[in-house]
Image (tube, helix red, strand yellow):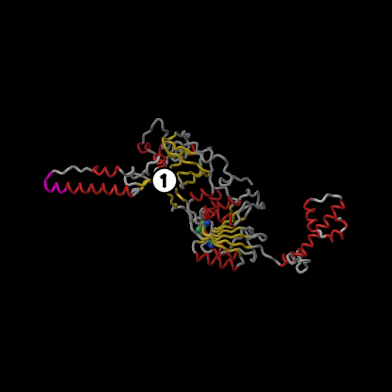
Amino acid sequence: MDVTPSPFLEPGHRTQAGSLAIVSLARDDFDAIRLEQSSGAVDGYAEGATLNTRFGSFPHSTLLDIPWGSQVRASAVDTGSRGRKRRLETTDDDTPVVSQDEGGKAPAKKATVASSGFIYILRPSPELWTSSLPHRTQVVYTPDYSYILQRIRARPGTRIIEAGAGSGSFSHASARAVYNGYPKDETDTKGKVFSFEFNEDRFHKMAEEIESHSLTGIVQIQHRDVYRDGFMVDGKSPDATAIFLDLPAPWKALQHLSRRIGSSPLDPKQTVHICTFSPCIEQVSRTVTELRTLGWTDVDMVEISQRRLNVVRERVGVNLPNERGNSQTPADVLEAVTKLRKVNQQNKQFQKSQIAQNKGTAAEPMDIDSSAAASETAPAPGKLPADDDHDKPWMQGRLTHRSESDLKTHTSYLVFAVLPPEWTEEDEEKALAKWPCGQESKIIGNVDKQARKKEKREQLASRTKKRKTKGEPLDSQTKRQKTDNDTPAESESAPATE
Ligand SMILES: C[S@@+](CC[C@H](N)C(=O)[O-])C[C@H]1O[C@@H](n2cnc3c(N)ncnc32)[C@H](O)[C@@H]1O
């Protein structure tokens, strides 16, 4: 079976046409694009297929055949028929005007670097896909799925059942976790994700994505109501050892995840690990009850709470320019008092001038800086007391940290449980044959101290005897133990030790 490697699993070292790529625009701002090799103008751009962002335009030709992670500068693109020239219906000798109909006929123009703007081009990963995927549902985010995958023992070769598939965030992460190669044919058993989705539109969208991300063979999606129809695939068991349920009522699906039913989707010989993902404690409670009823053990619940801390240097002061990172509050009491005095002084000046106006006399001009004497004593705005280090602009201000409130995690409760393999009559008989019960010659721990000492002495004596017979020298340990242990009576009665 010929397979194109998935960009999520084997992306190679360089970007290539036809591949999915993730564009990093800013921190936590990613876009997924499919790179195109265009030989002519596309969509009015003389440079061919072009990505437009708020940081400029990027013809795909500038994004191709470069190492993943490269920084790419924006280009000054020629919008040809799409831009100004089309509206004015005039042509410029330098610019091939290519209409939508002509697209592809004229050769693509070479891109020229623009004066500003850049992006990074990143290899697709489940984490970046989670940050850029088109949301069709609430999704499982990286902090949750990384923990879930290790708790359900997902590793290369594992067979996972996942329901519902939703937007495919968990599906991509689990596909990477279980990947141990593409199956060569139907009989080749490799790590696999068996995904189930009830909603028809989401099922079709997900099926398209699996295909376009070359994950066919690693992820198999079924259109199914799992509460009613369970988890068998084409009448066969997925032989799963790991299960993840992100469903509104996971307890309704648990009846199908048992080895005691006619056709079980579980591996009959191995322990199975499950995780259910529910936002409400009532859902957790019902799931736990059902898990216990069905013989699952080691049931526990976890909530992942990840906080990312933002450490910034903050400049504080009333006279600072109103810029990002500056806080317009007094840096200390001295600055606050100085400011108050200044405002007070200005008020007095103003009142004086008003009174003078009313009396018809000329007002004294307002002297805003007359309070300078007070402010002279205050430190410069935003500065800490004189110190060589604090004079450096990057050392100014106070170091503060706060947790980022907009970190994307979906707070849900994770319920974990374990289903051990079934213990049959046959297994019991085999165990009895191997370790017969009631025929033990001795029970460990029931021999008293004196008896144990005697046993040890006898063992040592027989070992020494054997060595002497063979003419081997006694090692120092044995000699010492012999001296410690041998009583005169024993030495006399044991000719071998004489
Ligand atoms: C929250 S979404 C799952 C999100 C997914 N885990 C992800 O990371 O993108 C829940 C999905 O379960 C599906 N669903 C609900 N009931 C179902 C059922 N009985 N059988 C199969 N899927 C079901 C919904 O259609 C929805 O797409």
Number of labelled discs?
1
**Residue 165, image quadrant:** bottom right
Left or right of 163, for residue 446: right
Q: Position of residue 228 (x, y in %)?
A: 56, 65
Mark 1: give few (<14), some (14-19) or many (20+) Cα within 10 Å: some
In the image, the segment drawn in magenta is: 354-361
Viewer-closest of 409 and 63: 409
Left or right of 468, for residue 219: left
Q: What is the residue that sits farthest to the top in this orientation?
A: 93
- Image vertical order of residue 488 relative to residue 110, above or below: below
Viewer-closest of 32 and 380: 380
- Image vertical order of residue 14 relative to residue 409, above or below: above
Q: Residue at x 43, y 43 (%)?
A: 53
Q: Is residue 46 something that shows in the picture?
A: yes
Give the secondary structure at mark 1.
strand
Magenta portion: prevailing SS class: helix
Residue 355 lies in magenta, yes or no?
Answer: yes
Q: Quadrant of the C terminus?
A: bottom right
**Residue 99, image quadrant:** top left
Q: Is mark 1 within 8 Å of ligand 1?
A: no
Q: Residue at x 82, y 55 (%)?
A: 463
Q: Residue at x 64, y 47 (%)?
A: 1
Q: Position of residue 389 (x, y in %)?
A: 42, 40
Q: Is residue 200 something that shows in the picture?
A: no
Q: Position of residue 484 (x, y in %)?
A: 78, 57
- Image vertical order of residue 387 relative to residue 191, above or below: above
Q: Position of residue 480 (x, y in %)?
A: 78, 54
Residue of label 1? 313
* Type of amino acid under label 1: Arg
